[in-house]
Amino acid sequence: MGPFDSALFVSVVGLSAPVLWAALGELISERGGVINIGLEGMVLGGAFAAYYVTWLTGSVWVGALASIAAGVAFAAIMGVLAIDRQADQIIVGLGILILGGGASALAFEQIFTGTGRTIVDHMSELEIPLLSDVPVIGEALFKQVPLVYLAYLAVPFVWWLLWRTRWGLAVRAAGESPEALEADGISVRAVRWTALLCAGVGGGLAGATLVVGSLGTFTENMSAGRGFIALAAVVFGRWRPVGVLGACLVFGGADALQLRLQAVGSIPWQVWTLVALIGVAAVAVPLVRGRQMTPAMALVPGVVAVAGFVLAVTEPTIDPPSQIWLMFPYVLALLVLAGFVGRARMPSALGLPYRRASEVA
Amino acid sequence: MTALAATRARRRLDLGALAPLAVSVAVAVVAGAVCLLVIGLTGNSIADTASAFVDGAFGGEDAVGDTIAVMIPLVLLGLAWIVASSGRQINLGLEGQILAGGIGTTVVGTNFDGLASPLHIALCVLAGGVCGALWAALPALLWVWRDVSVLLSSFMLNFVAVLLVAWLVRGPLQNPGPLGIVESRPVALSAVWPLVGSGSLRWDWVLIPIAVIALVVVQRWTTTGFRLRVISANESAARHAGMATTRIGAVAVMTSGAMAGIAGSSLILGSFTGTLKEGFSSGYGFIGIAVALLARNNPIGCVASALLFAALQQGGALVETRVGVSSASVDLAEGLVILFMAGSTWLLVKLTGHRRAAAELAPEGPVGTV
Amino acid sequence: MTDIAPSDTRPPALRLDAVTKRFGDVVANDHVSLTVARGEVHALLGENGAGKSTLMNVVYGLLQPDGGKIEIDGRPAEVGSPREALDLRIGMVHQHFKLVVDMTVAENVALSLGGMSLTRLDLGEVRARTTEMSERFGLLVDPDAVIEDLSVGEQQRVEILKLLLGGADLLILDEPTAVLAPPEWADLAQVLRGLVAEGRSIVFISHKLDEVFDIATRCTVLRDGRVVGTRLVGETDKAELAKLMVGREVVLRVTRERVAPGPPVLEVEHLSVKGGAHHVVSDVSFTLRGGEVLGVAGVDGNGQSELVAALTGMAEREAGEIRLLGEPAGEGRALAVDERLGVIPEDRHRDGVALDLSVADNLMLKDFDRRPFARRGIRSHARTREHCAALVADFDIRVSSLDTPLAEVSGGNQQKVVLARELAREPHLLIATQPTRGLDVGAMEFVYGRLAEFKRRGGATLLISTELEEVMSLSDRIAVMVNGRFVAILPCEEATLDVLGPLMASTRIASPTPAAA
């Protein structure tokens, strides 16, 4: 199995969970027409709230609730400005991004400088008997902390919310055609507010998962771009819960793999084989689906596949420095956006402030 | 036009000219007040904080010189944001572009020893601009070719640039000195901006008027400026008038990157040590955006708002050492300024009676492909 | 007040008493009073901009009145939002449909019935109710079809179904026939008669007299925001209503001048344009000569926009050739900036002007980088202003200054800005799409005058309009566009309503031709 062992899968599932929380919340909000580029700030705010409240109360669950409150508070600021005042969503998001980072860092330094106390409780793993003994994937799927389980359970829940409830129908309409929604007598404002608050909940819980779900500690900017990776995951997942789950696993997988390989210090043949298989799949899948493919389009994946196989056979000694490894998830996110997304169909009214007919005039 | 309507129009015009300025000043004041309040609430003396702040920013020739040194990259970054957003692009990658510019500057500055100073400086600044533009070319081209949102890709590249610098200062560019310190060799003396007088002010301040005047001239008197104005007002109409909106947008992002790269060069060549090290740019990218927003995307206004943020930065540093209030409060102030500015748009619309003011802050319309 | 008491003794479905609505300094509705009896089709007639839509948006709760009273079923009502209107059993079909285009019919119906509670969405039940209602009134539509795949007529049926399922007793239809081919109107009229027979009331907004005589019991005419009269349809005639609408004896009538055709200006051969997997324009060929007007008639959405996009370089053409003055026309931007071509875009706010920019900037949108307005990238403000001032005078554009933002200028003057910009380049070919949409009579007359002058000077005009009357009265030849094809090109003498109507509706149900791989 080389690097692809049980421990890797455990870390893939664990590392994907915070991104998944943030991405699911953002998915709902974007379906409702509100893009929140300040997600990263919400994650940081949620992380600090979870940390601080856990430190105060000693309860990780109260800490998790506090993270929700923090995320919702940021979402509320965004709602007042971007929904009620119809301010530009990108600009407001930018403000939330910086405010979340600044406020969490400031509070951390003010409260914890000199206290010496930096580690709080974190959730213990919840092992599901028997199932967790399944080889390779057992521990990954059935020996995780509760917040991680909940993140994955949230995927079908979000799907149900968006596609099987009246509220979900209204949310999707608010992102596609708010005028239609208003004409049907449903308040776009109310729908968008509730959808945006979901982004707050998701962002907050992403922070909680980082703190009480794993490390039990807080550091400045600890989210390290996960909020933005989550935004990319929503795009890559084509605004659908299952797609978002897949995207998060890809990004979480990249993160876990890079950590592992950094430790191993070289790239084993299994990884090269995986690269080659991705190249093959990139050519094969469109062909199987009966899409037209010009030689030029097949060039890049073809080269990737061939190079992957060659490297898998020769297995050269490559030991890049840790910084190069750490770039991997970000570079992958870029490649994924460039290579696989193309011109995806996003909610038509995404990012557009909605003015009621009576306000336009 | 009736006399009444004429008076009304004139009154609107007057308000329209003054209201944005008034709103910006009010936002700055309110954001500052909120920060002081937060500091007060955390149990620190507001009076001490305020006096430390003023001393840090303006107390003596050196303090003023340092404040201006911070102001230079901030003006450039504010202008960089304006250039990108007038091409309807959100360049969140300023930070990465500063770093790329810093790398280029360091490479040129540590080599070519013995060149005439003005030439060496010019080469370093050029290298910074080119590297910044190239770093920005990545998101620009991804957008043109693959429709990837510049917002996302440029931000993602910030992390890559941070890691790249972290590697370079431990690897190829590391100072081979005996201490094994994690930074580059200092740039040659011929590449350092000379001091203006006895204080700490350096000649790179000339970049401020040059850049501001250049942008104003482009906006007012060139066809490029006209194209950018139309594109940011109505992209579809621009396309129907035969403008190459995609290409112009991409060039705007690269130009924005070049200005950020020059800001990066200034941070290296004007710094005390003249070395490339980790975190030399930290936070500048976002402050630059706040500078532009507070100035309501007006190039000349950027000078004033950059001065404000530079003072905040320098004053904040002394506040941290003297009073012990974290300089993260500066981030807080930036966040508040951006939020207040975003929220003030409706107020401006109310004051001036039309929606044009709203369009000045950010181009309205779909986000593009996010 | 010329109100005529209805014979029905029950309280009227809707009574408006001195309703007033202002937008800033403009009074859109000035003390409007009218009564809609139960079981009647009440037509609301008026020119563009007379205030019909505004009035009904007030009734529907989308706008709040500045004065006056609204009574529903004899009870005073304040309609604060569409929700409250729906609760009062008032429903409205807007001119631009309010449908979520990427959802199915059933989902759209569910949305209109629903609210936003966290309760289960039972599409099965909605589907059943939709089918039942659609059969009852002959509003046939597949509940599982996605809206964007439906024809405009079918989408209209969905809108009406939504209202009926929501229990609406008073239906407001805003210009329902603007999007229909003449035979489709007959179907809709049938449905409306059925609804009235069941005791529902209908307000029918229109500016077409034929339809009013076809279906309405009474009609109220609005002009400049005021009621100028209410008449029983049986006791009046078209001439009287026309006079009421326009406010003077003669209805706007354009005289077509014959100009000896010059050499071919635009030659199009086998032009095809792809939109998604289908051809949105397929195999269109025609020749247009100097001094000639070729009108394109057709129901909205049959490929007219895409044809214009291909002819102006805004859309890629998949096949075919376009020749301008005998030489092959450029591709893409080269065509868009071609000085021999003038374009009046369909949606001027989206494609024709930048509302936030000044009148001067909008006049220069295409010529800013030409000599003498710019040299080597540097603009000459003096020359620019001189040119703009001349255009403003020549085209009688009423603005206080060249620096006025276009958003603060009336719609008619905005269109004059577009016209001035495009005609100032002295093009050989003018592509005019919906050139008078949303304009008042004065501005319309002006536009027609300029088009006639352009024709006299030997210019070739391609006129695309969904206003059949406009096409018929201006064109020398008329092409009928259906499903992306020109199904016929007729000389104007042969192109009567009786010929054009069936042609426009001919193959509408046929599925679009799949594009060659």
Image (cartoon, rainbow, N blue to C red):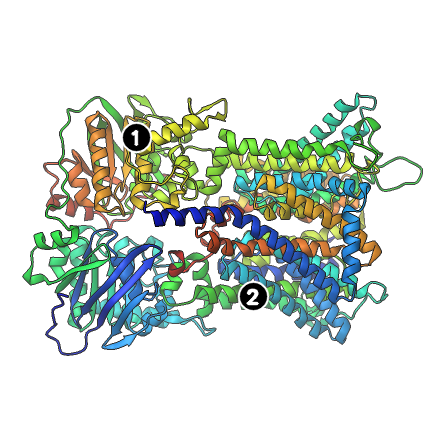
Residue C345 visible from this viewpoint: yes
Where is residue B124 shown, x and y percent of the image? Answer: 74, 29
The image shows a total of numbered marks equal to 2
Q: Which residue is mark 2?
A: A198
Where is residue C113 shown, x and y percent of the image? Answer: 36, 70
Question: In this orientation, which residue lies closer to the viewer: C484 or B198?
Answer: B198
Question: Residue visible at 28% across and 26% down?
Answer: C428
Question: Residue visible at 19% across and 49% down?
Answer: C505
Question: In this orientation, which residue lies closer to the viewer: B231 or C409?
Answer: C409
C198 left or right, relative to B147: left
Q: Which residue is mark 1?
A: C423
Q: Quadrant of residue A24?
A: bottom right
Question: Residue visible at 12% across and 76% down?
Answer: C8
Is there a contact, CB below 8 Å, between mark 2 and mark 1? no
Q: Label 1 is found on which chain of the structure?
A: C
Q: Amino acid at mark 2?
A: Cys
Where is residue C393 shown, x and y percent of the image? Answer: 30, 32
Is the same chain shared between marks 2 and 1?
no
C58 left or right, relative to B179: left
A154 left or right, relative to C330: right
Crowding near the residue tagged with mark 2, few <14, some 14–19, many ≥20 C-alpha atoms within 10 Å: many
Task: Report the residue that reaches farthest toward the front.
Answer: B3
Q: Amino acid at mark 1?
A: Leu
